[in-house]
Amino acid sequence: MSQPITRQDFDALMMPVYAPAAFIPVRGQGATLWDQQGKDYIDFAGGIAVNALGHAHPALRQALEQQAAKFWHTGNGYTNEPVLRLARQLVMATFADKVFFCNSGAEANEAALKVARKYAHDHFGPEKSGIVAFKNAFHGRTLFTVTAGGQPSYSQDFAPLPPDIHHAIFNDLNSAAALIDDNTCAVIVEPVQGEGGGLPADGEFLKGLRELCDKHHAALIFDEVQTGVGRTGELYAYMHYDVVPDLLSTAKALGGGFPMGALLAKESFADVMVPGTHGTTYGGNPLAGAVGHRVLELINSREVLDGVKQRHHWLVGRLHEINQRYGLFSEIRGLGLLIGGELRDEYQGKAKQILSLAAEEGAMVLIAGPSVIRFAPSLIITETELEHGLRRFERACERFLGEGLS
Ligand SMILES: *Cc1c(COP(=O)(O)O)cnc(C)c1O
């Protein structure tokens, strides 16, 4: 008989880059998960903004199982129908003319930065290599993307870092203007900083970046890895702002839990990438293509997108109520179902403690840094699940105030 698997096995066997919860989920349905002991949890974490259609959605299961019975992989010496169907959908639904598929958000951003560099080098020369990014941004964990990210604690241990990447202050156009010049090849920005705390960009800020990029012939890259695929109540967040990027990275919810990423590009940028310039073994494989196609079909409907806005009001409304009672948050903000609650000064650094108490009460939430509680649930979470989960979260807040201050 094989030994049972326990949480202790994580500490014994896994490289300790994570500190996962004390319980192990074994099954999910909609926005509910069950652990090994059969205890249920309402899932406001959504696999970090990935499970946009909840767990074990029947239509996604069907798409995966149908493709799994046909073939899984050929490599990019051959194309396949599912991925071409998905590419057509993405091109029809967005500004993009061309798509590159990969397996994660970091890879999509890596591709975006490489395309921007090559475009600039091909058209203007090798000195046009500067990348402007923002403090507190998150773009992934490859060396290039982690350096573009604006959290030195994530990159400094891996020096020497790729050069010519500069960080301005998010939502401060003057600080960006001071760094953008004719040697800038790209500006990369999240329309809502996800890991940075669910912080939406100001419309004027993004419009200003678009103008600066036009003036200096730099690519404007929107990192929509977290905000994409309906999360904000539009298919992509750029649609809220009426600012069109040149390149857009998307991942997380695109596969609804199946690993996949994509870079969306305008023709002129896509054109500099010819056979041999970039690639990946698994990118655009038929399993991911089949699932992604179904995800997009389901989410890119008025019903689901308007439902996100409706759920935003439910969730934010309830959080304000809870806050009136317990006064934990100094601000509740966000767009669609990407919502951050910033802890008041006296509770700074305590987000993880609240997360753990919430899990004990049967509600899964996220944090974004040490002082923000983040919610990124399924876009189709039911009102009952939401109510239920927030009642549990409220109990966790109550306990936090009882225990946390003692
Ligand atoms: C999660 C995230 C990434 C990285 O995606 P991975 O799939 O973990 O590589 C990049 N950018 C943003 C905005 C993200 O939220």
Image: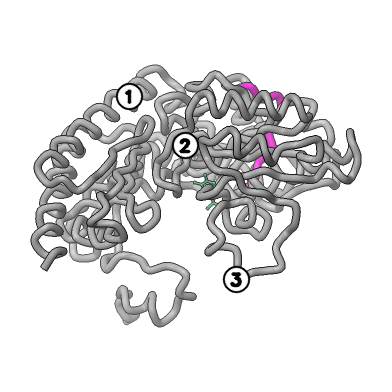
- The image's mark for residue 309 is 1
Q: In this view, does 169 lie to the left or right of 49?
A: right
Label 3 C-beta lies within 8 Å of the nearest ligand 1 atom: no
Q: Name the residue under label 3.
A: 157
Residue 314 spot, x, y in % from top left: 22, 29
Residue drawn at x 40%, y 49% is 48
Instruction: Please state the extent of the stretch shown in magenta in the rendering.
Output: 94-102
> Between disc 2 and disc 1, whose residue precedes?
2
Kind of residue indicated by mark 2 = Val
Residue drawn at x 18%, y 54% is 362
Q: Crowdedness of circle 3 by 10 Å Cα count: few (<14), some, many (20+)?
A: few
Kind of residue indicated by mark 1 = Lys
Residue 301 spot, x, y in % from top left: 42, 20
Q: In this view, does 362 lie to the left or right of 373?
A: left
Helix, strand or loop at label 1? It is helix
Q: Mark 2 points at which residue?
A: 192
Kind of residue indicated by mark 3 = Asp
Helix, strand or loop at label 3? It is helix
Q: Crowdedness of circle 1 by 10 Å Cα count: few (<14), some, many (20+)?
A: some
